[in-house]
């Protein structure tokens, strides 16, 4: 269950990813802190939920898999930012947010067996 | 010799409230960098627009409204002629600043990087029209607090991982402890 501090960190990161979906309702300065549109909304909701499940079940493999998936999305967004083909409909701010969540989940998953 | 010896030995507030506020500051600064990465648009970063726009336009202010002549020379002769490389570097640095400060990982290193990036921005736009100089001074000061407090230890991954890094033998663990 959720007794391990690494598991709790995975839950917080997953919850943070899901909360970031509210940015889909923001437009322009000052409140559009990150561009969360289109497929990115589904991505943060689904992968955030999976991260919460990973933390809840204490599954290191699921934390690492989810972190890798989020990181892959960040790399995809970095490649497509500013281009006509932009599957995640994001920009550099989307890259930054996904990068943080992905690195965070990978770090927590990698460290979990030591906790 | 300490200027005020009694104050020098008084420990900083380690209460839950103080730690929560430091975490709030760290996440807030991270969100500012995340937002700032949003308008660095590859592949040309505004250089090909007519008139120039985006990052290229704001970087050009270092030459049009110089703050520090050697920096203006560097921008004019090195940065602007190689702007694709420079634009990608800025995007990657600012995205990484937002990412690492958001989760509080290796926070002292990224606070130092944030100060360097803030200095570069300040030297570019401080004298440009309609800029508010307090913005840049406040950015610099906020990063000083993150650096000084090791802000990732409050609600960040540094607080989770430092006990593990402390047990690592050799230089890797010592380095990570210093950078966090």
Image (tube, coloured by chain):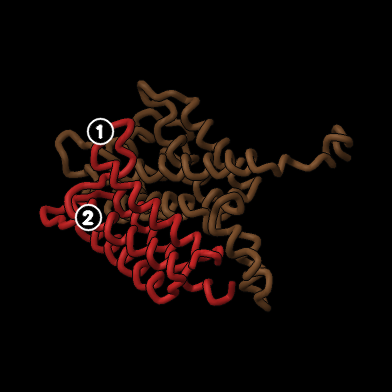
Chain colours: A red, B brown
Q: Quadrant of residue A50?
A: bottom left
Q: Residue at x 58, y 65 (%)?
A: B161
Q: Residue furthest left?
A: A84
Front-most of residues B26 and A79: B26
The relative height of residue A65 versus residue A76 in the rendered view (above or below) is below
x%, y% of residue B43? Answer: 21, 53
Q: Quadrant of residue B127?
A: top left
Quadrant where the image shows the N terminus of chain B = top right
The relative height of residue B46 versus residue A45 in the rendered view (above or below) is above
- Cα–Cα span, label 2 and label 1: 21 Å
The residue tagged 1 is: A28
> Do dots 2 and 1 share one subunit?
yes
Dot 2: element: helix
Q: Earlier in the sequence, mark 2 or mark 1?
A: 1
x%, y% of residue A51? Answer: 37, 63
Q: Residue at x 49, y 60 (%)?
A: A9
The residue tagged 2 is: A42
x%, y% of residue B110? Answer: 52, 53
x%, y% of residue B64? Answer: 34, 30
Dot 1: chain letter: A
Any part of residue A96 in sight: no
Dot 1: element: loop
Badge 1: few (under 14), some or many (20 or more) residues near its Cα, within 10 Å?
A: few
Badge 2: few (under 14), some or many (20 or more) residues near its Cα, within 10 Å?
A: some
């Amino acid at each position: 269950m959720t007794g391990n501090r690494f598991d709790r960190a995975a839950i917080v990161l997953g919850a943070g990813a899901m909360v970031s979906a509210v940015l889909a309702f923001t437009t322009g300065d000052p409140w559009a802190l990150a561009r969360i549109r289109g497929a990115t909304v589904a991505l943060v909701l689904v992968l955030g939920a999976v991260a919460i499940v990973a933390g809840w079940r204490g599954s290191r493999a699921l934390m690492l898999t989810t972190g890798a998936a989020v990181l892959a999305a960040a790399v995809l967004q970095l490649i497509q930012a500013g281009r006509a083909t932009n599957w995640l409909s994001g920009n550099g701010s989307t890259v930054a947010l996904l990068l943080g969540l992905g690195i965070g989940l990978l770090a927590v998953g990698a460290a979990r067996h030591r906790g | 010799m300490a200027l005020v010896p009694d104050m020098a030995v008084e420990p900083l507030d380690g209460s839950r409230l103080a730690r929560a506020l430091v975490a709030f500051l760290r996440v807030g600064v991270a969100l500012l960098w995340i937002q700032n990465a949003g308008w660095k648009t590859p592949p040309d970063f505004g250089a090909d627009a007519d008139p120039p726009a985006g990052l290229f336009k704001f970087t050009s202010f270092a030459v049009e409204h110089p703050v520090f002549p050697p920096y203006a020379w560097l921008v004019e002769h090195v940065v602007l002629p190689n702007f694709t490389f420079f634009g990608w570097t800025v995007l990657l640095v600012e995205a990484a600043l937002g990412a690492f400060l958001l989760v509080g990982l290796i926070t002292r290193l990224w606070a130092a990087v944030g100060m360097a990036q803030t200095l570069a921005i300040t030297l570019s736009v401080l004298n440009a029209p309609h800029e508010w100089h307090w913005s840049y001074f406040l950015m610099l000061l906020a990063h000083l607090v993150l650096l000084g407090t090791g802000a990732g230890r409050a609600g960040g991954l540094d607080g989770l991982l430092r006990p593990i890094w402390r047990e690592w033998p050799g230089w890797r663990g010592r380095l990570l402890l210093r950078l966090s």
